[in-house]
Image (cartoon, helix red, strand yellow):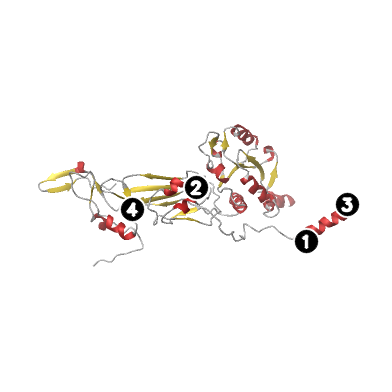
Amino acid sequence: MLKNLCQKMFGRSLWVYHANSGGCNGCDIEVLNVLTPYYDVERFGIKLVGSPRHADVMLCQGPAMRSTAQSLKRAYEAMPAPKLVFAIGSCACGGGIWFDSYSVLGPVEKILPVSYYIPGCPPRPEAIIYGVAVALGLADKKTAPVVFKQLEFPIPQYHPGDLRGDGGMVVYEKLEKI
Amino acid sequence: MSILSKLEETLICLKAGRVTLPYPTHAEPLPDKFRGRPIFDATKCIGCAGCANNCPAREILVYDVCQEVRVLQYLGRRCTYCGRCADVCPEKAITMSLEFENATNRIGDLGQKLEVFMSTCQRCGRCFKGAAALDELKMKGYRSDDLESERWIYRAHAFLEAEPAVADIEIELD
């Protein structure tokens, strides 16, 4: 019974490893803020561990840099098999402001398979907790892609090559909207 | 001495009370001037691409798919929510919302894509859009039917045959 209770209580407890591959420390501070008693994330069984061999989740901050990409990949490979990668901050999600500079390879997903993205520069501690809650199944994700389309083109377009002279009248052969 | 200091510590800890925020169940109010992710309003956008020019992360892409339609694509990946696009937008089509709970498992969820209908100048061929909605209505038949000089021909009354652009408005005809 105690075992069942423990599984129920701690079955979803994640041990996180905190990997900064060249960020500006902004996201680091927010992640550490999440672990403080104020935003106490240990309620959900989340614990910071020092070694990737103990970790279930890797929290990536900062873009994949030329100098740290190899180390990041090695740390990822050292993690035991059911593993998640969280990309925290706009650098890890998309490469950051300096995404096209020499030393930045790009987003973290160029090197690791990222399972959850938490955008923001830096994301609020609440946003990080929300991302963890989405991963744990406590909350539903709120974002969806927005596409505004012109349903039909207001003006049809014809090409003069498709015009055929018919007496004094002009007939459109291919009445095709773009 | 050490016992006293421990007692003092205990007192301090008792005085602090409970500080943990009950975040996922109950959200605290956001601070003033908080900027979340930008929301693009397609009805106000004139396709001037000022936001794309001012974005420090080169996050907003503007391209023309054809002569009339300009596509404004916001990727949402490396946006730092700096608010420069909302600052520079002449039509106030971009608002910095209060949304920060944007965690997702697909990065494509963060994107926004607008297709803006643009009229083209008869002389230079460049896209433009009127200042007001009435100007836009005036522009839609604005093309000459001179076959020799024009490569593209537009028929103005074709607009009436199509479905209304805005679904809410129903025009009753006898």
Output the chain of dot 4: B
- Judging by the rendered image, the residue that carries numbered circle 1 is B15
Output the chain of dot 3: B
Task: Give the percent coordinates (x, y) of residue B162.
Answer: 28, 56
Q: Do the residues marked 1 and 4 share a common chain?
A: yes
Of the residues shown, which amino acid type is indicated by label 3? Answer: Ser
Of the residues shown, which amino acid type is indicated by label 1? Answer: Lys
Output the chain of dot 2: B
Secondary structure at badge 2 equals: loop
B82 vs A11, nearest the viewer: B82
- Judging by the rendered image, the residue that carries numbered circle 3 is B2
Q: Local crowd at mark 3 within 10 Å, few (<14), some, or many (≥20)?
A: few
Secondary structure at badge 4 equals: loop
Q: How many marks?
A: 4
Sequence-first disc among 1 and 2: 1
- Judging by the rendered image, the residue that carries numbered circle 2 is B76
Cβ atoms under marks 1 and 3 closer than 8 Å: no
Q: Do the residues marked 2 and 4 share a common chain?
A: yes
Using the numbered discs, state the Cα–Cα distance from disc 2 to disc 4 in whole angstroms: 26 Å
- Judging by the rendered image, the residue that carries numbered circle 4 is B129
Using the numbered discs, state the Cα–Cα distance from disc 1 to disc 3 in whole angstroms: 20 Å
Of the residues shown, which amino acid type is indicated by label 2? Answer: Gly
Of the residues shown, which amino acid type is indicated by label 4? Answer: Lys
Residue A137 appears in view:
no
Task: Give the percent coordinates (x, y) of residue A10.
Answer: 69, 49
Q: Nearer the viewer, mark 2 or mark 4?
A: 4
Secondary structure at badge 3 equals: helix
Q: Do the residues marked 1 and 3 share a common chain?
A: yes
Q: Local crowd at mark 4 within 10 Å, few (<14), some, or many (≥20)?
A: some
Cβ atoms under marks 3 and 2 closer than 8 Å: no
